Image (tube, grey):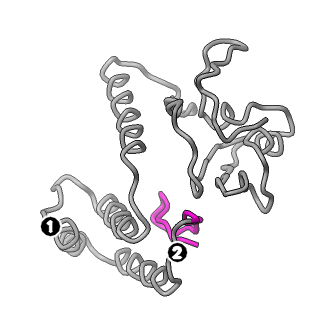
Amino acid sequence: MTTLVTNDGGAAAAAAPSNLTVPSELEEQIAAEIEVLKGMDLPELRLRWRKLFRSSAPAHLPKYLLFRIIAYKIQAKVFGDLDRETLRYLDRIAKDYVRRREAGETRSRKKPPPIPSVPSGRSLKTGTTLIREHEGVLQRVIVVKDGFLWGEVTYQSLSEVARAITGTNWNGPRFFGMREKKGRGETDPARRCGHDRG
């Protein structure tokens, strides 16, 4: 298992990609380093930033963001960082957010912000974690070699996982936000996920 920093600054376990073997001693060392970071004050975090990034920390970043960025960078050096395609996708989400904000678009605080669908040519790699909130509970599904792991069970398709989560028939890629909604009842065949067989 890989230690990852969560939004609340705590540590959470997540599966490392299957092609990555990290000794448990190294995982423990990284977890210990993150624990040390938690106890640092702002000047200490700025110093750690300088050593890690070889530049000064942006003056406007508060302590909690410095901690999260440093913790992420430490883990990314060992476990691997995001690929270019994922970075472009995240950049697209950020630019869309800025565009909506500048246009004065508002949304209810209870409604999550819209997230663009995953590009159609993209396939899910082993180790990818899909997260979806359903009825107030965060559901995590990990892409594994033989399908999709949810809970303790491996399913052959995302649709099977969505059915297990909801108790009703769902299109798996749509349930996990991997397809755009074109209109009522319409689907876009170009948006099909190569891993979904049902």
Q: At x 59% / y 26%, what residue is drawn?
A: 191
Residue 164 x %, y %: 83, 45
Q: Which of 55 and 148 is in front in this view?
A: 148
Residue 76 x %, y %: 38, 64
Residue 51 lies, with reference to residue 135, above or below; the image says below
The residue beneath circle 1 is 54
Question: How far apart are the two marked residues, 2 and 1, measured between alpha carbons?
Answer: 28 Å
Name, please, the residue furthest toward the right: 167
Q: At x 61% / y 15%, what residue is drawn?
A: 182
**Secondary structure beneath disc 1?**
loop
Residue 155 lies, with reference to residue 185, above or below; the image says below
Tag 1: amino acid: Arg
Q: Is residue 136 left or right of residue 21?
A: right
Residue 79 lies, with reference to residue 91, above or below; the image says below
Position of the C terminus, as image quadrant, is top right
Task: State which region is magenta.
Answer: 1-18
The residue beneath circle 2 is 21
Q: Is residue 25 magenta?
A: no
The total of numbered circles placed on residues is 2
Position of the N terminus, as image quadrant, is bottom right
Q: Which of 111 and 145 is in front in this view?
A: 145
Tag 2: amino acid: Thr
Residue 28 x %, y %: 48, 83
